[in-house]
Amino acid sequence: MANSDLGAAKRNKKDEFYTSLSDIEQEMVHYRDYFEDKTIFMNCDDPEWSNFWIYFEMNFNFLGLKRLISTHYVADGSEKAFALVLERQEHNYPKLTKTNLKQNGDFRSEEAVAYLKKSDIVITNPPFSLWREYLAQLVEYEKDFIILGNVNAITYKEGSELTFAFQIWVYIIYIILFLGLFFKGILLI
């Protein structure tokens, strides 16, 4: 995924960048063991067309996921915001539940934060315009994460503070955040 693609999206005032399924597959294979028995929350990926949702739904049992959650954001109230939850049941059969949300599905909403608190790891590509606030929320709730972002994100106050604290390492095209020996987060750039 080229940084120029992200730059073009930003220049065109598009606040979203849709990650290809092949890019997701190529990256997520490295974390298979980490995902086992975890709850993944995608709080900026509409489950109706998100390739992140497609990947994790298709590989739910293969990865040994406990639960997969995604919230559908509705900015203008033209439709109902909802959450999809795919949860492992007896004999590894996943059960899909759709819940209408009272709020708009924004990652900052009380309902989304409640899902965030129940999750082990957040995987998404947040809106560019809310990058600082989004990263700050993940740090505040001490969540492991894999998020897509622009390389300039490490120059933001939140990113640079983590860098100077030696919690972020730049490795080829990834920024990897480690605390101790435990996986903490990856910013895909």
Image (spheres, helix red, strand yellow):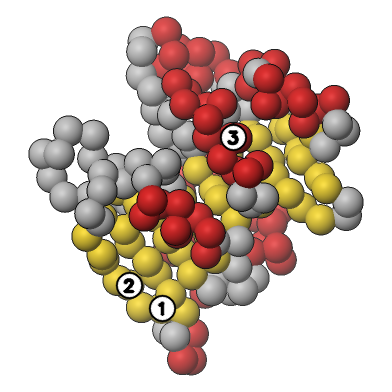
Is residue 166 at all visible to an observer of this figure? yes
Q: Hey, which residue is sitting farthest top in the picture?
A: 11
Of badges 1 and 3, nearer the viewer stands 3
Question: Badges 2 and 1: C-beta atoms under 8 Å apart?
Answer: yes
Residue 94 rendering spot, x and y as whole percentages: 41, 78
**For mark 1, what is the residue?**
94
Residue at 67% over, 26% down = 158
Quadrant of image for the C terminus:
top right
Q: Amino acid at mark 3?
A: Leu
Tell me where residue 96 appears, x and y as whole percent. Answer: 32, 72
* Camera-side residue of 86 and 137: 137
Front disc: 3 or 2: 3
Residue under circle 3? 135
**Image-based side of 13 in relation to 25, left or right:** left
From what the image shows, is residue 71 above or below residue 135? below
- The CA distance from mark 2 to mark 1 is 7 Å
Q: Counting other residues with Cα less than 10 Å from the Cα at mark 1, is it few (<14), some (14-19), or many (20 or more)?
A: some
Badge 1 element: strand
Residue at the outermost bottom position: 91
Residue ID for mark 2: 96
Name above or below for residue 30 compared with residue 7: below
Spatial separation of the CA atoms under disc 1 and disc 3: 30 Å
Separation (CA) of disc 3 from disc 2: 28 Å
Mark 3 / mark 2, whichever is N-terminal: 2
Dot 2 surroundings within 10 Å: few (below 14), some, or many (20 or more)?
some
- Circle 3 sits in a helix, a strand or a loop, which is it? helix
Q: Residue at x 55, y 70 (%)?
A: 65
